[in-house]
Amino acid sequence: MRVLAVETSGTHGSVACGDPEAGATGDFREEVFEQSLSHGRAVAPAAERLLRECGWRASDLDLLAVGLGPGSFTGVRVGIAFVKGLALGTGRPVVGVPSLEALARNAPADAPAVATLVDARWGEAYLAVFRRGAGGLSRELPETVLEPAGIAARIPADAVVIGNGLGPFGGELRGRGCALPDPDLARVSAVAVACLAASTLRRTGPSPLHALAPIYLRGSHAERGLREPSGKSSTAATR
């Protein structure tokens, strides 16, 4: 299966191109880029380079995959807009997947539960919890946005916790039995998005293109600014 995947929900974005069915872990080329404000400039050139390296044209693809967030409002919209445009031009099927579910694939294979904890800015975190069963990971706690005081109570003691939220919010988990693994596992990878999308395509089919939309758990930075009392401002990045 020839897949092109885009993931732009976080500070580090990426594009991946390859076959998730080639062996146990698939066969992929991936290009990673930093700083969410540059995602709009980076996605298309990265996709073009990777397709060229694979020797494919966009019309050769079997699937287009994209991370839906939650995360950067701007970044997620950039990724979805690019994939929608490519789908309209090529007629290729698309599958959108929750970025926190793709992040959960970074956890060790023997983890009984996985909590994905991502910095949502403004002193909040995005959290989702997955439980491992015979069929793999299934969602135990849907994506939610929390303040620090509510994080520890929502994470099972047997969970492995991954994500960039461990930096600002890891202190909330001190004294808990949950494991906090290598911070290098905090990046949502376009390879994980591709593998999850391929599995979803086999199970439920493609996503309706008109319904492909970001996962928003709260208002945008601009919307929040409208609700701020007069004279207050925030320097937080749009998330």
Image (cartoon, helix red, strand yellow):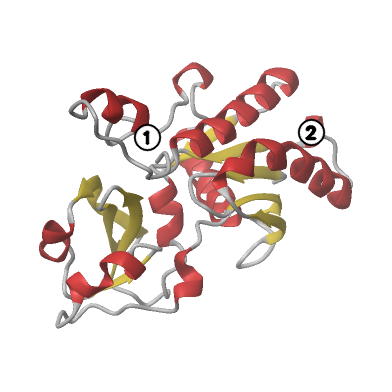
Residue lying at 39% horizontally and 52% vertically, measured from the top left: 101
| Residue at the farthest front position | 231
Residue 116 vs 193, above or below: the answer is: below
Instruction: Using residue 214 as the reference point, say whether residue 174 is left or right of it.
Output: left
Of the pair 99 and 61, the residue shown nearer to us: 99
List the residue tagged with mark 1: 215
Q: Quadrant of the C terminus?
A: top left
Residue 68 vs 165, above or below: the answer is: above
List the residue tagged with mark 2: 58
Of the pair 180 and 21, the residue shown nearer to us: 180
Asked which quadrant contains residue 159, the reply is: bottom left
Residue 64 vs 190, above or below: the answer is: above
Local secondary structure at mark 1: loop
Report the amino acid beneath label 1. Answer: Ile
Local secondary structure at mark 2: helix
- Mark closest to the chain's N terminus, 2 or 1: 2
Q: What percent of the width, then of the height, locates residue 120?
A: 33, 49
Which marked residue is nearer to the observer: mark 2 or mark 1?
1
Q: What percent of the width, then of the height, locates residue 109?
A: 42, 74
Q: Is residue 228 visible?
A: yes
Residue lying at 66% horizontally and 22% vertically, measured from the top left: 85
